[in-house]
Amino acid sequence: MEIIRRRPMLSGLVGFFLLFTILGSFPIDPETKQAVVVQFGKPTRILNRYKPGEPIGGPGAGISWRIPFVDNIVWIDKRVLDVDMDRQQVLSTDQLRLEVDAFARYRIVDPLRMYIRARSVERVSEALRPILGSELRNELGQRPFSDLLSPERQGVMENVRLGLDRVARQYGAEIIDVRIKKADLPDGTPLQSAYDRMRTARLQEARSIRAQGAKQAQIIRAEADAQASKTYAASFGKDQDFYEFYRAMQSYQTTFIGDNGEKTSPTTIILSPQNDYLKEFTGRGR
Amino acid sequence: MPALPLFFGPHASYSGVMIIISGLGARARGLLSDIKGPWGSSGGGSDKGGGDKGGNGGGDGDKPSPGPWGEPAKRRPRSGGGGGGASNVSSLDEFMRRSRARFGGGGGGSFGGLPGRPDRSIIGWGLLGVILLWLVFTSMHRIAPEERGVVNRFGRYSHTLGPGIGLTLPSPIDRVIKIDVENIRNIDLGSSGTETLMLTGDQNIIDIAYSVRWNIRDPELYLFELAQPDDTIRQVAESAMRAVISRVSLDDAIGEKRGDIETQVNDIMQRILDQYRAGVRIQGVAIKQADPPNAVNDAFKEVTAAQQEAQSYMNQARAYALQLTAKAQGEATAFDKVYEEYRLAPGVTQRRMYYETMERVLSKVDKTIIEAPGVIPYLPLPQVQKSQPREQGQ
């Protein structure tokens, strides 16, 4: 007490210093972070290490301790992290090109190894990015183009994941998932030729649709003709002789007068008195 | 250092500095004793004594030391704890009084008996109030109906508060992160301005725009499991849509399979995000646009035109067919009717029909009847023909 009274300024400073030291000795470890405690550069403890299947709120996170000035804490993200790849051109076995954009999700599962090998999470990402590209190129390069369109089906992505995981383990990381975000034809010739193919396919389709339509129309007409002819036959076939007479009468009328007011070319008929129509004209008693 | 002697007067500069420091200390102690006030600690007397002792230690000369502001100390008799003589009252006492007056506002030190007591209790109650307010505001949390409050105890996830008033430990211990879980968020992918091209299963290219709606299912997973949840959902959406589109043909994607595609993308996204433990629920995927790219759009329009054209061919044929069959039926029915009559009296009917037809025919045409047998070969046909223009001219 005496010293405080004598040198309050100094003791105040010391007090603050002690307070911060004490507060600093009990670091709070949030759920989103794991930590490596480093003693003069030598890692001694790991806080809140990721354990698979452990629910949130487990015993890892929370308040912890450290020896002031001796222990240094390196924070490392515990969450699922992202490696986004640059666009890669992939050549399939049948020499077709595809531009692929993929991403991988990973998590630091061994903070100590990560700290020793890479120091920071950013450097892990940087190390994994080119490897993701090359793994993808290698794996997709062994396939024909048609397989590249849906690489999930053949387990290609699982192979890429395993390949990348092997490397990631060296950095204390685990690859959770690798997915292809985009798979496009490269600009220029491949894209243009695909467009040409689509265009010609469509024109062909258009032409075939027209032809089909014409065919259908013709069939409909023919069927109608057949139907009409059947109707005529059923009706006219009852008495062929009468039909001949009846039809002749109709035909004369159509030919000389016209049908439905339709004007025919003017006709001059020269009749002989021997004509059946004029039979009575000459007088019955001749 | 030439300014210091001028400032503090001709006395030892060292003691002047010390006075300042001890004065600050006294000020701090004064604060502390104020805090103790409400709890009934009567630290005033002891403080006073302490202050005097400090004064003794600091101002070791007989002469009154100048105050920190260079003002000579006032010699005033003091009631409480006046251990030192009048000559021994240092500037520190004055300084303490000033500082106390500054804090207390009423210059309580000049009163006898209980210096500063009422002022201290006011400060004390004020502080208590502040602490109570602090406790109330940091331990009671109003959670809106659409929100959840994720409680972290010293950084460790403890529990999740539902809507209503939630009670937690005060702030440095428990911290609450409020997060809106009901709000359905929307991500638009492939905006209408630019083309988002995708390869379909039949190696065609489609221009697609879609949106994903999602909300938070498990706030603690959403907060703690993914480094960039929003980016992750976007990337997963892109990946899932590409995967599904690469399995269907262009015609299906443009046409009637859209609903299927939406459902499949939804399911795949949900599965992947569950695998990441994202704590997110995909509410729906909507394809807003699925068209052929602009470069080939004309060819696709050609197909539509061809379909229309084919349809019109068929319509024409159907019209013809209807007309033809109707005509056939009409004629057949007419024949049947006439035939029925004819069968009743064949000879008469036939003659009647013959004459009727002949009448109709011959009444409308030019007729020439030649009776002499030898005339026929010499009939001037041009003259017969001439009658036609005349007829037309009339």
Image: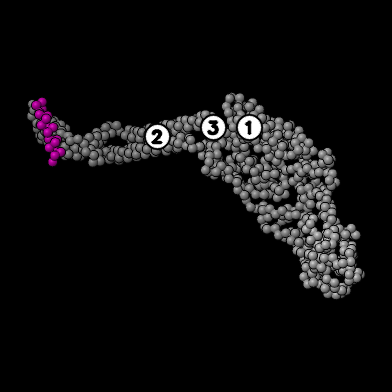
Residue B254, percent from left and from top: 52, 39
Which comes before the other along the chain, label 3 or label 1? 1
Label 2, residues with CA under 10 Å away: few <14, some 14-19, many ≥20 = many
* Image point (82%, 73%), residue name: B110
**Of the pair B286 and A278, the residue shown nearer to us:** B286
Residue type pointed to by label 2: Ala
Please, which chain is the residue tagged with disc 2 on? Answer: A
Please give the range of residues in magenta. Answer: B376-394
Q: Secondary structure at mark 3?
A: loop
Residue A187 image label: 3
Residue A12, percent from left and from top: 83, 57
Q: Which residue is mark 2?
A: A217
Which comes before the other along the chain, label 2 or label 3? 3
**Of the pair A28 and B222, the residue shown nearer to us:** A28
Q: Which residue is mark 1?
A: A151
| In this rendering, the label closer to the viewer, 2 or 1 | 1
User: Mark 2 touching mark 3, by CB under 8 A?
Assistant: no
Q: Is residue B313 shown left or right of residue A24?
A: left
Please, which chain is the residue tagged with disc 3 on? Answer: A
Residue A49, percent from left and from top: 79, 42
Q: CA distance from mark 3 to mark 1?
A: 21 Å
Q: In the displayed structure, would residue B140 be above or below residue A121?
A: below
User: Mark 3 touching mark 1, by CB under 8 A?
Assistant: no
Q: CA distance from mark 2 to mark 1?
A: 46 Å
Which comes before the other along the chain, label 2 or label 1? 1
| In this rendering, the label closer to the viewer, 2 or 3 | 3
- Extreme-top residue of the structure: A94
Whether residue A264 is in magenta: the answer is no
Q: Is residue B385 shown left or right of residue B14?
A: left
